[in-house]
Amino acid sequence: MFELDVRSRKAIYEQLVDKVKEMIVYGILKPDEQLPSVRALSTQLTVNPNTIQKAYRELEREGYIYSLKGKGASYHRLWNIRMKP
């Protein structure tokens, strides 16, 4: 689902932000579809959980996702958005 280019000059969190946006644009991710948890994605990609959290915060700040707190975990789901030009 997510692949990173460790040789890229672009920061890993920026690659994640771009990848999620791309998946939204191409309809791979649907509105309200749950994204992997920070812990699960950091394990899958073998990156620091803070990197995943930073990407999710940026996506939330830009209005692409929203977070719901519950049972001590954050659930990241896609927001039903109108794509920005």
Image (cartoon, rainbow, N blue to C red):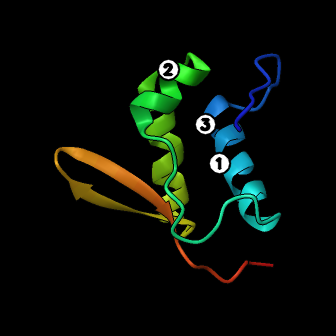
The residue lying toward the viewer, choosing from 12 and 22, is: 22
- How far from the left and from the top, in percent, is residue 51? 50, 31
Query: Disc number at residue 66?
Result: none
Amino acid, disc 2:
Thr
Q: Is residue 41 above or below residue 44?
A: below
Q: Quadrant of residue 5?
A: top right
Of the image marks 1 and 2, the number of the one nearer the N terminus: 1
Residue at x-position 58% and y-position 72%: 31
Give the Cα separation between the discs numbered 2 and 3.
Answer: 15 Å
Are the residues tagged 1 and 3 within 8 Å (C-beta)?
Answer: yes
Task: Count residues near mark 2 (Cα–Cα under 10 Å), then give few for <14, some for 14-19, many for 20+.
Answer: few
Give the residue at mark 3.
13
On the rendered structure, is 25 left or right of 55? right
The kind of secondary structure element at disc 2 is helix
Give the residue at mark 2.
43
Q: Nearer the viewer, mark 2 or mark 3?
A: 2
Give the residue at mark 1.
17
Q: Is residue 20 above or below residue 14?
A: below
Give the Cα separation between the discs numbered 1 and 3.
Answer: 6 Å
- Judged from this view, the residue extending furthest toward the left is 71
Amino acid, disc 1:
Val
Residue at x-position 67% and y-position 52%: 20
Q: Nearer the viewer, mark 1 or mark 2?
A: 2
- How far from the left and from the top, in percent, is residue 57? 45, 51
The residue lying toward the viewer, choosing from 60 and 45, is: 45
Are the residues tagged 2 and 3 within 8 Å (C-beta)?
Answer: no
Of the image marks 2 and 3, the number of the one nearer the N terminus: 3
The residue lying toward the viewer, choosing from 58 and 77, is: 77
Q: Is residue 4 above or below residue 18?
A: above
The kind of secondary structure element at disc 1 is helix
Amino acid, disc 3:
Tyr
